[in-house]
Image (cartoon, coloured by chain):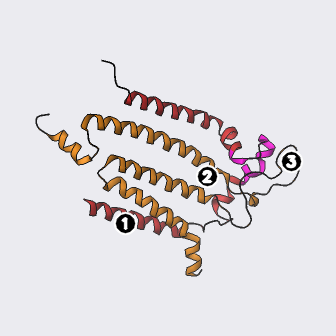
Amino acid sequence: MKSLAFIATIITGALLIFATVDFPDWGDPNSPASLHVSPRYIEKTVKETGVPNMVTSVLADYRGYDTLFETTVIFTAGITAVMLIRRPRK
Amino acid sequence: MGTIEFIIGKYNYWVYIILMMVGFYAMIAKHNLVKKLIGMNIFQWAIILYYVSIGSKKGGATIPIIQNGHGEVTHAIEAAQYLNPLPHVLMLTAIVVGVSTTGVALALIIMIYRRFHTLEEDEIIDILRAPNK
């Protein structure tokens, strides 16, 4: 079984490495991730939100609801862990 | 494009793929449940590192905090001056989800240990298949 798992791992890794040939180079300023969507946030974040830290402005302002309901995720996980670990009273 | 430039341009992706495959192998080949969980965490972190590396820009770009950005900002802000902030933000969300799944999985592992008194997967299967229990 272990050799089968090893072969599956090697095949998956080889396919992923084969896919990186089409990727843009690391740190390329002209890669699609740097040219689309993100310049709009970088250029307008101070004008629209007044926060110099772009990560904060996107996390707490543009994606405020996402961050709000992230707390729901943590709350649900915590409640689940407590319900699982707690021993019921006899 | 020469071979050296090709390797320099792509080697960071290869590092993350190797890390991801270490986690993948641990997930599917190990029999201990805690080792499987650690493999899943390595897998998650490989993906997070990969996404953060997408945000990098060579050529003088700095961290995504606007310089002299307090008060009235009158100077021009160019996108090439700052790193891409969006992968950082999205991976913050992914870290939160990863912590939640790890916590719930550890709680489940504690419950499994309480019932079977072992964490080895094959021993648990033997106990479940035993005829008189």
Q: CA distance from mark 1 to mark 3?
A: 52 Å
Q: Mark 2 falls on what kind of element?
A: helix
Residue of label 3: B73
Q: Which mark is residue A10?
A: 1
Residue count near mark 3 (Cα–Cα under 10 Å), binned few <14, some 14–19, many ≥20: some
- Viewer-proximal residue among A75 and A12: A75
Q: Which residues are magenta?
A: A39-55
Q: Main secondary structure of the magenta part?
A: helix
Residue count near mark 1 (Cα–Cα under 10 Å), binned few <14, some 14–19, many ≥20: some
Instruction: Establish if A45 lies above or below A21.
Output: above
Quadrant of the image occupied by residue A87: top left
Q: CA distance from mark 3 to mark 2?
A: 25 Å
Q: Quadrant of the C terminus of chain B?
A: top left
What colour is chain B?
A: orange
> Label 2 lies in what chain?
B
Question: What amino acid does circle 2 point to?
Answer: Pro
Q: Is residue A88 left or right of residue A33?
A: left
Q: Mark 3 falls on what kind of element?
A: loop
Question: What amino acid does circle 3 point to?
Answer: Val
Residue B27, given in percent of the width and then of the height, sits at 36, 53
Q: Is residue A61 left or right of residue A46?
A: left
Residue B100, given in percent of the width and then of the height, sits at 48, 39
Residue of label 2: B87
Q: Residue at x 69, y 57 (%)?
A: B83
Instruction: Establish if B98 lies above or below A25.
Output: above
